Image (cartoon, helix red, strand yellow):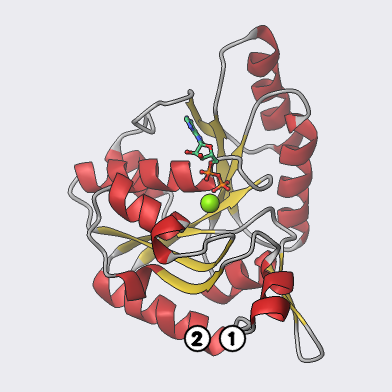
């Protein structure tokens, strides 16, 4: 049985892809055979421009394209809207079989979410699916990637509270683009006190290492 970890963000562009690559790099440095999976990406006109291609390159995984990504939409809209315009809506059976395939290839799989926790994945007459559904299908714990700048307490806490209300387990936060200022130091304290979840790592701009041992990173996967 492979172990997995879902990388959720407090929103778009907070660094889920960047942090996913650092998690994979740490695991691989420790000798863990680690792969990556993203069910849905939007705003990627080609595979080469997708999150999956970035992580595969940045963490030197060498994973085959068909294992990395199931659904790609060119337009930078929420997946539910991109699918309405471009066709090819998400199918649960497709995601589950892709997950089986990547788990057959890798004992540790990092799964990147899209957008924030209530990102709509497929909304039509047949289904109403959000990112929470994708996480639940795979039954994985998550880490939440959050900035620590102005406004981040609110988004971080609401993401954690919502995931708790949805019975989705969260291992803690990874703070990204961390600047060690008086405000950011306090925001990190407030986020932990509000949510009762640990901040596992603080990653500075352009930091090339997650700052955790491979064993510590591996311990987050279940
Ligand atoms: N710690 C960081 N240092 C430097 N650049 C970063 C860092 N985190 C994210 N970025 C950059 O910010 C942009 C958004 O990050 P990304 O990981 O793609 O966000 P998300 O996956 O949450 O949408 C990308 O260009 C990425 O390379
Ligand atoms: Mg991303």
Q: Residues within 10 Å of mark 1 (few under 14, many from 20)?
A: few
Circle on res. 94 = 2
The residues bearing labels 2 and 1 have C-alpha atoms spaced at a distance of: 5 Å
Residue linked to disc 1: 91
Q: Which mark is residue 198?
A: none
Above or below for 65 versus 110: below
Q: Are marks 2 and 1 in contact (CB under 8 Å)?
A: yes
**Which residue is drawn at the image coordinates 59% and 59% (left, top)?**
43
Kindly tell me whether mark 2's CB lies below 8 Å from ligand 2. no
Query: In this view, which residue lies farthest toward the left?
Result: 31
Could you say where residue 60 lies in the image, as x and y percent from the top left?
Answer: 24, 50
| Position of residue 42 in the picture relative to residue 65 (left or right) | right
- Between residue 91 and residue 199, name the one nearer to us: 91
- Residue at image coords 71%, 56%: 163
Q: From the top left corner, tell me how far across and down residue 28 is, in percent.
A: 23, 48
For this view, does 123 lie left or right of residue 24?
A: right
Q: Is residue 76 left or right of residue 104?
A: right
């Amino acid at each position: 049985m492979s172990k997995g970890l879902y990388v959720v963000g407090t929103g778009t562009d907070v660094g889920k892809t960047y942090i996913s690559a650092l998690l994979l790099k740490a695991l691989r440095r420790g000798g863990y055979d680690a792969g990556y999976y993203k069910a849905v990406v939007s705003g990627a006109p080609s595979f080469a421009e997708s999150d999956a291609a970035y992580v595969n390159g940045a963490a030197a995984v060498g994973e085959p394209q068909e294992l990395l990504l199931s659904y790609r939409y060119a337009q930078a809209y929420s997946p539910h809207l991109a699918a309405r315009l471009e066709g090819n809506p998400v199918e649960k059976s497709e995601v589950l079989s892709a997950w089986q395939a990547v788990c057959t290839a890798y004992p540790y799989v990092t799964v990147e979410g899209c957008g924030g926790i209530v990102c709509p994945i497929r909304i039509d007459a047949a289904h109403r699916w959000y990112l929470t559904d994708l996480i639940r299908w795979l039954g994985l714990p998550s880490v939440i990637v959050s900035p620590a700048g102005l406004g981040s307490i609110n988004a971080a806490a609401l993401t954690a509270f919502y995931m708790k209300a949805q019975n989705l387990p969260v291992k803690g936060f990874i703070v990204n683009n961390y600047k060690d200022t008086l405000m950011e130091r306090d925001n990190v304290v407030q986020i932990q006190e509000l949510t009762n979840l640990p901040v596992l790592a603080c990653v500075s701009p352009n930091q090339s290492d997650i700052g955790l041992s491979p064993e510590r990173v591996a311990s987050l996967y279940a």
